[in-house]
């Protein structure tokens, strides 16, 4: 606990965990609610959102490294069309960890979304019909019916996301190697180096 590198790694790991888990759970729940509507394209959306989960982290890291390139990256090109950028996504200490968080959230979004979708489909329609008869709004139905009934699933996705985020390594290794200035060094990467 006296080492500066260890403390930086711990701080970065906690930052990554909090940001990635909160974003992943909130966005995946939102997408699951949107996709849960009666729609014939539901299976297509499931595949599209789940595809990054089954793709290797090394492959997705290389794709995102290309997207984040300051000169030829697709993200900076798109931002230049609206008069922004270019940004050094992976070499700026302020942007490096948020960039890795964005990539990781995109990669793991489909897993939690499918779990939430399964939970949403397990909620009986009678609850919503009774709420409709009482004049409940969409927000009230979500707050008083959907969210409480999804509590076990939310807890499961939260715990598995925290466990996975404390084990982050491949993105760090391939995108930044712990840099710049140890801004993306995590506990697992520090253990790997030692």
Image (tube, helix red, strand yellow):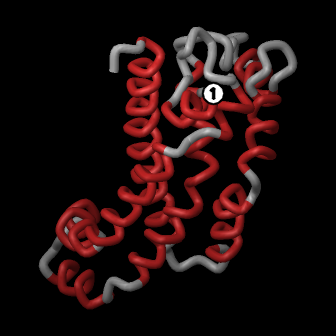
User: Quadrant of the rendered structure where residue 157 is?
Assistant: bottom left
Q: Residue at x 47, y 41 (%)?
A: 20
Q: Residue at x 65, y 80 (%)?
A: 40
Foreground pick, 9 / 153: 9
Q: Residue at x 66, y 59 (%)?
A: 53
Residue on which disc 1 sits: 193
Q: Residue at x 70, y 69 (%)?
A: 47
Examine the rendered structure and indicate whether residue 121 appears above or below residue 191: below
**Which residue is outermost to the right?**
72
Label 1: few (<14), some (14–19) or many (≥20) C-alpha neighbours in 10 Å: few
Q: Label 1: state its secondary structure.
A: helix
Foreground pick, 106 / 159: 159
Examine the rendered structure and indicate whether residue 138 appears above or below residue 86: below
User: Quadrant of the rendered structure where residue 13 is?
Assistant: top left
Indicate the position of residue 112 as horizontal and vertical percent values. Answer: 49, 62
Indicate the position of residue 29 as horizontal and vertical percent values. Answer: 42, 59
Q: Is residue 115 left or right of residue 127?
A: right
Quarter placement of the C terminus? top right
**Which residue is outermost to the left?**
134
Foreground pick, 94 / 1: 1
Quarter placement of the N terminus? top left
Total labels: the figure holds 1
Q: Is residue 166 left or right of residue 140?
A: right
Indicate the position of residue 130 as horizontal and vertical percent values. Answer: 18, 85
Examine the rendered structure and indicate whether residue 99 appears above or below residue 91: below
User: Quadrant of the rendered structure where residue 156 is?
Assistant: bottom left
Foreground pick, 171 / 187: 187
């Amino acid at each position: 606990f006296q080492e500066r590198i260890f403390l930086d790694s711990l701080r970065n790991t906690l930052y990554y965990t909090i940001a990635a888990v909160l974003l992943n759970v909130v966005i995946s729940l939102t997408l699951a609610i949107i996709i849960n509507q009666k729609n014939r394209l539901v299976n297509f959306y499931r595949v599209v959102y789940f595809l990054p989960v089954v793709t290797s982290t090394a492959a997705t890291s290389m794709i995102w490294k290309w997207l984040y390139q300051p000169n030829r990256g697709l993200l900076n090109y798109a931002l230049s069309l609206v008069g922004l950028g270019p940004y050094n996504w992976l070499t700026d200490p302020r942007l490096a960890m948020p960039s890795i968080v964005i990539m990781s959230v995109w990669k793991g979004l489909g897993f939690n979304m499918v779990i939430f979708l399964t939970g949403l489909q397990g909620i009986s329609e009678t609850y919503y019909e009774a709420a409709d008869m009482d004049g409940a709004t969409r927000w009230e139905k979500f707050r008083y019916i959907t969210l409480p009934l999804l509590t076990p699933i939310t807890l499961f996705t939260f715990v598995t996301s925290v466990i996975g985020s404390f084990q982050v390594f491949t993105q760090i290794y391939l995108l930044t190697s712990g840099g710049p200035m140890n801004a993306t060094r995590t506990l697992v990467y520090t253990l790997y180096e030692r």
